[in-house]
């Protein structure tokens, strides 16, 4: 089965693109959703995170305090690597298990930090959702109310637009409206169906 990795920077439109592929019947698995499932109360992964980062990252109700964990790893690359070393191998195992079960011409893995975490080898092709950085900032601001400085700090921890475009096979330009995005999704859907079932 053909496997596509869908990636892009914060607020670039990954979820919106994934939703349009879902509507076309394409099976999709999102690494962020897996990360949430793995860190649900009672999960062994959450226990490991508690052991490494301390009780301060667990809320009184037993759930992961994501904001507290984010604060710890944001300015500390070594801590971020420790967290990634806990999460990423497990996410990878679950993705591979899912790919082994899915029956479809092609499937999509949404991996926001594909390049940052060296997971490009998981897929046959890489699809980059692309947006100029100033528009990323505008869309994240209108969605979340984060201030521009905070968004720029997040952008600085992610691969640059140029790095992503250099590493991708396909690109969706999401600087237009939703109709323009949908048209590009449909074109790629047909490309992927063709690639999945080569003539002859
Ligand atoms: P994150 O990295 O934060 O998970 P994302 O890459 O999944 O974000 P989306 O949530 O799909 O991005 O989009 C970010 C915001 O921009 C959302 O509020 C979404 O509704 C909006 N958006 C997406 N595409 C467009 C578009 N073409 N025109 C206008 N707004 C858009």
Image (cartoon, grey):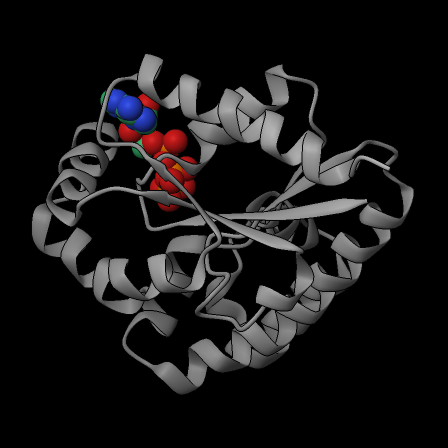
Q: Position of residue 167 (x, y in %)?
A: 43, 64
55 left or right, relative to 26? left
Q: Is residue 108 above or below residue 100?
A: above
Q: Is residue 170 visible?
A: yes
Q: Is residue 81 above or below residue 119?
A: below
For the C terminus, give its image quadrant. top right
Q: Quadrant of the N terminus?
A: top right
Q: Is residue 102 left or right of residue 59?
A: right
Q: Position of residue 196 (x, y in %)?
A: 75, 38
**Residue at image x 36%, y 63%?**
166
In depth, the one of 188 and 29 nearer the eye is: 188
Q: Residue at x 67, y 55 (%)?
A: 124
Q: Is residue 74 left or right of residue 87?
A: left
| Relative side of 187 to 11, left or right | right
Q: Nearer the viewer, residue 5 or 54?
A: 5
Give residue 134's position: percent from left, percent from top: 10, 44
> Measured along the vertical axis of the image, is residue 58 above or below residue 129?
below
Q: Residue at x 31, y 40 (%)?
A: 12
């Amino acid at each position: 089965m053909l496997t596509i990795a869908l990636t892009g920077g914060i607020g670039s439109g990954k979820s919106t693109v994934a939703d349009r592929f879902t509507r076309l019947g394409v099976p999709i698995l999102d690494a962020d959703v897996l990360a949430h499932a793995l860190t649900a109360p009672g999960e062994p992964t959450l226990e490991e995170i508690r052991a490494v980062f301390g009780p301060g990252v667990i809320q009184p109700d037993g759930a992961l305090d994501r904001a507290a964990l984010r604060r710890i790893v944001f300015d500390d690359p070594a801590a971020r690597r420790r967290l990634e070393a806990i999460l990423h191998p497990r996410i990878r195992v679950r993705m591979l298990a899912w790919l082994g079960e899915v029956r479809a011409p092609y499937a999509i893995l949404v991996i926001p930090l594909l390049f940052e975490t060296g997971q490009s080898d998981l897929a046959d092709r890489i699809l980059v959702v692309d947006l100029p950085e100033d528009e990323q900032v505008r869309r994240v601001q209108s969605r979340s109310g984060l201030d521009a400085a905070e968004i720029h700090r997040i952008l600085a921890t992610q691969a640059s637009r140029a790095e992503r475009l250099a590493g991708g096979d396909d690109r969706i330009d999401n600087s237009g409206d939703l109709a323009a995005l949908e048209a590009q999704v449909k074109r790629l859907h047909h490309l992927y169906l063709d690639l999945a079932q080569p003539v002859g």
